[in-house]
Image (cartoon, rainbow, N blue to C red):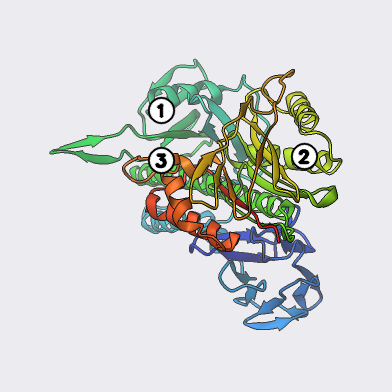
Amino acid sequence: MPESGARLVVQDASGNEREVEIAQIPFTLGRQADNDLVLLDTRISRRHARIVRDPRGFLLEDIESRHGTYLNGERVERCLLRDGDRIGLGVTDAYRLTFRSEPSGLASLLEEIEKTPETAAPRLQHLNLLLQLAQMLHRAAALDEILTAVVDSALQLFDAERGILFLAGDKGEPRLRIARTRSGANLALDEGDDAFAVVRRVMETRREEVILEEFGDGRTAYGAEALEPGRQGILALPLQKLPMAERGGETLLYTQPKLLGALYLESRGANAMMTRLDRQALDTLAVESAMIIENASLIRVAREQERNRHDLDVARTIQQSLLPRSLPQAGHFRIHAVTTPCRTVGGDYYDVVALPEGRVGLVVADVSGKGLPAAMMSMTLQGAFSALAAADLSLEELLRRINSLLYDRTPPQMYATLFYGVLDREGRFQFVNAGHVPPFVLHAGGTVESLDFPNFPLGMFEDATFGVSSLQLHPGDQILVFSDGLTEAQNEAHEMLGEARVQEILLTAAPQGAEPADVCARIVRAAESFVGSAPQADDVTVALLQFTPP
């Protein structure tokens, strides 16, 4: 940590707290990934604020942020920071930042431990400081700082010359993380170092090793506690999470402790001594270190999830911006559409294409899969379809080109279903169905017809052909186009909504003269009522086209 000890205490909306050292000047804060402190909230500007320094101390500067920078509740452009100042970045329900300029308790405790006399009486104080250190480690900033503090503390307790910390790899193998000397210098080790062999045994057996080796004949003694002059002392401790107890009926079930790594200490001092209290202190340090490593791993996963959620939010914003902001309305038709993704971003999309001679095209597509990959393919399909449909190609040629593009440029396991129909002023409706769920036509007389004219989905076969069909609409006829997320919506009893129920909902929700937006809203509400509290399993898109000639 820098000599200044300046840092920010960062608390998120869930109350989780961490400390971030101000390691360089200027120190930038914002949403963009290359800031010194990245805060993942879309309301925070990409470059929101920065901390600089002049002869007076640290200063907070706003960088023309959208919602302003606040110090102790007051908006500022540039202001001197004092210990304990609260920093706000335009929103009050996201992150809370507190500036700290005093040296951290972690550094202070390490200094006290280093100054502790090596007599028997102060050892109780020595252990007390160690326990305080263990509590503070849970509030330290970064994992590397925490692990360095663990090694440095262990070096002082054991009066050792070398301290090495290993973390367990994916298969339980030891991976070197930190190697330091008593003076605080970092060490470079290779696989041939004796520490690797000792640590492998410790991690395999999950038992500590104490080794005394005489320099003269190389003989070793295990389990000794006093390190006599002229001997090399080695202590290796497994770092493992404490066993957990779970109740299974009337029986307590204990799970095996999770191995997280090992701590290796080596002493060559002529007057080294390790008391039972030292052993207890080291054992406490090993337990606390394991808990800290486990917590740091969970925090790292949480941060990755937070970043992924941020990426999904950005993708959703982009995807929503590509949907038509307003749909065309003319004297001979009215139209409305709505889509609801199930995982922030989805694979469904819809669009309306204005064509020559007053014709209008309606497309609804559904990409296989969910989440970000489906959203990316959906945006690719949307861009290609919009460009080609505007050229007013025949429906056969249009889908042939789209199919060829998706086949060449998307993974083999991904494909898209699509329904596209074109309505002219006289009510002639030409359509092509590429593997999509059949739409329904609600005739003015109150009957429902299914437009089932299937073709292969897009992107599945290179040389697929697509047949076109047509239908003559009469005044008042309505066409409901939807994705399979509607018919396959399930309630808590795992019953699907199904086509029959959708037809019944359509008959009730779409009386003659009803506005398309109202009809779509009623259909979505009816589906939500059927599903109840069951989670949404797929994206849902609903579009309604009404033929309303003068």
Which of the marked residues, 3 or 1, is nearer the chain's N terminus? 1
Q: Secondary structure at mark 1?
A: strand
| Residue bearing the label numbered 3 | 274
Q: Quadrant of residue 433?
A: top right
Residue sitting at the far bottom: 74
Identify whether 285 is placed above or below 258: below
Type of the residue with mark 3: Met
| Residue bearing the label numbered 2 | 385
| Residue bearing the label numbered 1 | 209
- Name the one closer to the observer, 472 or 530: 472
Q: Position of residue 126 (x, y in %)?
A: 42, 55
Q: Is residue 148 left or right of residue 75?
A: left
Q: Residue at 70% across / 30% down in the picture? A: 468
- Name the one closer to the observer, 479 or 94: 479
Which of the marked residues, 3 or 2, is nearer the chain's N terminus? 3
Q: Nearer the viewer, mark 2 or mark 1?
A: 2
Identify whether 264 is placed above or below 80: above
Query: Are the residues tagged 2 and 1 within 8 Å (C-beta)?
Result: no
The quadrant of the image that shows the C terminus is bottom right
